[in-house]
């Protein structure tokens, strides 16, 4: 029934070539980040390294104090992920289970807030942060992104909690559980799979943010990984090997998250698409 | 209903924060767009001056034209290619070479998506460097990909296709799992070609996913900032200027805060209108 013997190999070959093109930059970065400058200038970016040379990575690491940047990114992203999930749960409890009046408009408001371009908030936020002394602090980014991410989380979670089985909650209230206890002891534990997807998504989205952190985090002590790399790109002292070393340091955490959370992420992408 | 009243308390923290971080700043931005302001001192009321200036500003119109190019690169091309790739992986490779092969290829297409977009810019900035970059070496060229005004936008577009492609592939493959395989098998027995089945069965089945992907990618293309900042800073000349970078420039380098706010307001409006139109079309398609 299935003809086209050689045809299927042609299709496979085409798809494999495309995959190779997609992955090629990653391989190239990895190969060149461990090449000495002399090796790079005599053999170019396409040869394999003559020997493993890690000094480029070490130099770049020390020059930008990369450990500090990693820590900043981690602190901001982790705080946002946890706080935004807490806010999302509180909101979704009121909207999805409490069904407060005007919930549709509140949801629309949150969703519009999440889709607004950050450019339309940037200057006032910058100005306000300076006024209250939060400019150039990690806390400023934690607050802003907690609100932005929670706006999306509320939208997604409200739909999930809207279908929460009523019987369980009724049984709990018969047993004398108040609303707050019902939330923390019943709704949250049962929704844990969805909540963990949200935590991971918020963490990675916040990690990847560039525009507002670029404006707010101007000193070395507060900068995140993408901002530090993005600002350094094209600086005079960056030679070929150091550029590839910096690219590698930007890639590694991102790929690590991807490998650790792969299952959850795929599940989450699917949940997001259907809702 | 006294019962639902107590639930308002759960919304209170978010509403306060939302007001302070989103609503108030947005209104402040709107108000500032009617003023002349350098960022220090008192803003001067200017009425519609900033908007009148926008309409005549060639750079502003160019920046929106570039956005159209980026919508092609970030939304349309990835969606079309993604449909073909997802269908090929799902019901061709998956069935003839096993689902593991299909999943491995999918993961490779998705890999660029895990990067922060600014880091993707760093990677390509290095690869496209005119003197030591890998791309020129590979093809034996001496092109200044990002420095040549005739080439820069096309180059940025190509980078963005690379960056975005994996997202639709993953979403469409997930959508195809939901679809009923019996339809495909029946059509295949009736002798329908792969292309006909793709067009008449696969595409209609994953229409909801297609809408979501087109909408989110179009919004992302309208907002694009990181890769422009890292790769070209809007240059050379205005060759890759986009509204978000244009407003950033006016806010933080030219001290034209009023003008920057007007650009940001127009961008916000465009995004809201686009979202609204998409949702209308989607409703009607149901």
Image: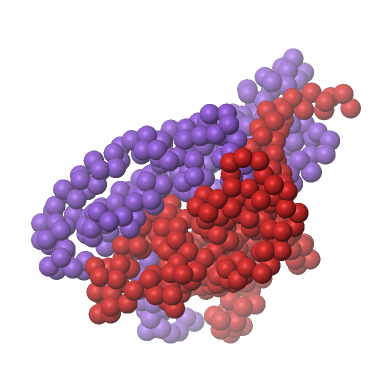
Q: Which x, y percent locates residue B271? A: 67, 58
Q: Which x, y percent locates residue B208? A: 66, 62
Q: Residue at x 66, y 64 (%)?
A: B54
Q: Is residue A270 visible?
A: no
Q: Which x, y percent locates residue B7? A: 77, 27
Q: Residue at x 10, y 56 (%)?
A: A51
Vertical side of B8 occupied by B79: above or below:
below
Snapshot quadrant of residue B131 = bottom left
Q: Residue at x 67, y 19 (%)?
A: A181
Judging from the image, the colouring scheme is: by chain
Q: Residue at x 41, y 62 (%)?
A: B231
Q: Is residue B263 visible?
A: yes
Which shade of the palette goes to chain B? red
Vertical side of A267 occupied by B151: above or below:
below
Depth check: A271 or B19 in front?
B19
Vertical side of A205 occupied by B129: above or below:
below
Q: Is residue B7 left or right of residue B150?
A: right
Vertical side of A247 occupied by A256: above or below:
above
Which shade of the palette goes to chain A? purple
Depth check: A113 or B181 in front?
A113
Depth check: B160 or A63 in front?
A63
Q: Which x, y percent locates residue A200? A: 49, 41
Q: Is residue A180 left or right of residue A146?
A: right
Q: How many marks?
A: 0
């Amino acid at each position: 029934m299935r003809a086209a013997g050689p045809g299927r190999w042609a299709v496979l070959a085409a798809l494999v070539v495309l995959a190779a093109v997609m992955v090629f930059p990653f391989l190239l970065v990895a190969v060149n980040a461990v090449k000495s400058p002399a090796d790079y200038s005599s053999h170019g970016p396409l040869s394999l390294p003559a020997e493993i040379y890690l000094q480029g990575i070490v130099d770049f690491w020390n020059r930008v104090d990369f450990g500090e940047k990693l820590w900043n990114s981690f602190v901001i992203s982790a705080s946002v992920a946890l706080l935004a999930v807490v806010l999302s749960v509180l909101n979704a409890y009121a909207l999805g289970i409490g069904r407060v009046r005007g919930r549709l408009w509140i949801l629309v408001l949150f969703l519009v807030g999440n889709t607004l371009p950050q450019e339309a908030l940037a200057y006032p936020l910058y100005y306000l942060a300076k006024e209250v002394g939060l400019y150039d602090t990690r806390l400023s980014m934690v607050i802003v992104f907690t609100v932005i991410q929670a706006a999306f989380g509320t939208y997604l979670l409200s739909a999930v909690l809207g279908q929460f089985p009523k019987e369980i909650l009724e049984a709990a209230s018969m047993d004398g559980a108040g609303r707050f206890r019902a939330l923390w002891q019943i709704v949250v534990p049962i929704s844990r799979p969805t909540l963990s997807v949200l935590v991971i998504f918020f963490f990675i989205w916040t990690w990847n943010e560039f525009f507002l952190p670029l404006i707010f985090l101007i000193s070395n002590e507060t900068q995140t990984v993408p901002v530090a790399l993005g600002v350094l790109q094209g600086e005079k002292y960056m030679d070929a090997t150091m550029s590839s070393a910096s690219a590698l340091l930007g890639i590694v955490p991102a790929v690590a998250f991807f490998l650790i959370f792969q299952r959850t992420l795929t599940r989450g992408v699917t949940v997001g698409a259907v809702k | 209903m006294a019962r639902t009243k107590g639930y308002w308390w759960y919304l209170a923290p978010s509403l306060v924060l939302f007001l302070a971080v989103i609503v108030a700043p947005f209104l402040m931005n709107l108000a500032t767009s009617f003023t002349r302001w350098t960022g220090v001192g008192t803003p001067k009321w200017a009425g519609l001056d900033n908007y009148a200036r926008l309409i005549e500003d060639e750079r502003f119109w160019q920046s929106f034209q570039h956005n159209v190019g980026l919508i092609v690169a970030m939304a349309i091309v990835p969606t079309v290619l993604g449909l073909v790739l997802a269908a090929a992986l799902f019901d061709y490779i998956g069935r003839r070479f096993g689902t593991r092969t299909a999943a491995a290829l999918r993961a490779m297409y998705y890999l660029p998506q895990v990067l922060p977009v600014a880091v993707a810019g760093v990677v390509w900035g290095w690869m496209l460097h005119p003197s030591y970059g890998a791309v020129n070496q590979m093809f034996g060229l001496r092109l200044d990909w990002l420095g040549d005004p005739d080439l820069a936008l096309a180059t940025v577009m190509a980078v963005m296709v690379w960056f975005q492609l994996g997202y639709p592939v993953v979403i469409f493959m997930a959508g195809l799992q939901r679809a009923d395989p019996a339809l495909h098998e029946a059509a295949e027995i009736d002798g329908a070609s792969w292309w006909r089945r793709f067009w008449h069965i696969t595409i209609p089945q994953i229409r909801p996913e297609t809408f979501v992907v087109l909408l989110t990618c179009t919004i992302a293309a309208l907002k694009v900032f990181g890769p422009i900042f890292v790769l070209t800073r809007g240059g050379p000349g205005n060759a890759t200027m986009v509204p978000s970078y244009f407003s950033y420039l006016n806010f933080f380098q030219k001290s034209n805060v009023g003008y920057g706010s007007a650009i940001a307001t127009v961008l916000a409006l465009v995004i809201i209108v686009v979202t609204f139109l998409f949702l209308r079309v989607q409703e009607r398609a149901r």
